[in-house]
Image: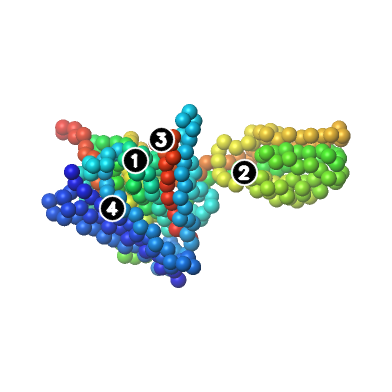
Amino acid sequence: MATTTATLTLSSTDLLSDELALSTTATLTTAGTSTGITQASGLSRKTLTYGSSAAIVHTALHRAGDYTADKATKVYIKNVSTTASEYFTIKIGDETLGRLYAGDWTFFPWAATSGTKETFAVTVGGTVAAGDSWEFDGITTTSADSTLNNFAAAISAQVYPNWTTTVSSAVVTFVARYAASDGVITGDTAITGDVITDLGGSDLTMAISGGTAGAGSSSPSDISILPSVHTGMTYETMLIHE
Amino acid sequence: MATTTAAVTLSSDLLSDNMSVSASTTCMKAGTEGDGLDMMDYGYIDIPTGDEYDLLDANNSGLNTNKANKLYIANHSTDETFYVIVAIDGVIGRLYAGDWMFIPWGAVDQHDDIEITANGGTNTLCYALFHEGRTLTAS
């Protein structure tokens, strides 16, 4: 069994009239047990830089959907900046935790409560011809022959930046990689950004279904950070989880 | 100026090689490098099950907001199944018996109270808030 410890020391000789010397060590265990926690992601280090005219936006640091919710997960984040006025604003979901100033670090438990991943299905229908294509999420799939199921399989075999897929006969089911509320589905008939190219005029159809029921919702637990300045600010982070 | 140091060491044998991460910071007022946080609230409290309680009140405390406040909470319960859910409007996470946390706290508005819900039984918490002072209101 792995043994992971987190030791905190708070000390000051002049904050109080007496010396402050607080030290505590936690042995990190899985939720509700004395069994040591066994997985870690990190340690990672990254510098966030924005152009002088660009908007500074929140960067997702840890996505709740990648981890099991309501466990004894711990998060460590450090602002490596050495300029005293520079800080990261730490958010969990929509809630602001606080500002992490230069040199500061934080260590806290994380619920990792995920939202709902958007999902929908595309059914390859009509008649497909070699050379017909379908584009979605920046990926274009071109049919090699006139078999509907083969075209569906080819679509599913692609690697999409924001979606995972499965295929059954002529139906390809898409599931978003991350939970979000501002997805591409507007109902059972509309999908943002898909393009059918029907070279032979062979009535290829790509019917959308399940979109209404498969709408996503944003995660209330994703951890994001917002640097205070455009110039490079560096953070370090690590996740210890189950 | 007070000098308060917060240091953390994370060490483990869960990887194939030993892991050791250490960090230390001197708790400064927001945006300064020579002016340390000089106010502290400290508490040791039992939290019963059944309700969500405000451990610290962001709205009525007069605490200066969006500063470099630091909050330490430790769960001194000894039953490993006991935990408290720590929330700032939304849930942050579960602090199990023996665990501690150390976070910046913006305390920006009335939604930013530090809320605690005990589970398993009455949990005993120790907490310390290092901050930049309060704007007090006459009673």
Q: What residue type is labelled 4?
A: Ala
Looking at the image, can residue B55 be seen?
no
Q: Is residue B4 left or right of residue B11?
A: left
Q: Percent position (x, y) of residue A42?
A: 47, 56
In the rendered structure, which disc, 3 or 1, sits on the residue that comes first in sequence?
1
State which quadrant residue B64 falls in.
Answer: top left
Give the quadrant of the N terminus of chain A: bottom left
Task: Select label 3 or label 2 by which is in front.
Answer: 3
Chain of the residue on which disc 3 is drawn: A
Residues indicated by labels 4 and 2 sit on the same polypeptide chain: no
Q: Answer left or right for A177 relative to B129.
A: right
In this figure, which residue is indicated by the disc labeled 3?
A229
Residue count near mark 2 (Cα–Cα under 10 Å), binned few <14, some 14–19, many ≥20:
few
Q: Which residue is drawn at 23% across and 44% down?
A: B36
Point out which mark residue B6 bears.
4
| SS class, disc 4 | strand
Residue A38 at x, y percent in the picture: 47, 64
Whether residues under marks 1 and 2 lie with C-beta atoms below 8 angstroms apart, the answer is: no
Residue type (three-letter) at the residue carrying disc 1: Thr
Residue identified by numbered label 1: A83
**Nearest the eye: B124 or A161:** A161
In the rendered structure, find residue A162 and report the number of the disc placed on it.
Answer: 2
User: Do residues under tags 3 and 2 come within 8 Å of each other at their CB atoms?
Assistant: no
Numbered disc 2: secondary structure: loop
Is the same chain shared between marks 3 and 4? Answer: no
Considering only vertical position in the picture, is A3 above or below A59?
below
Label 3 is placed on what type of residue?
Val
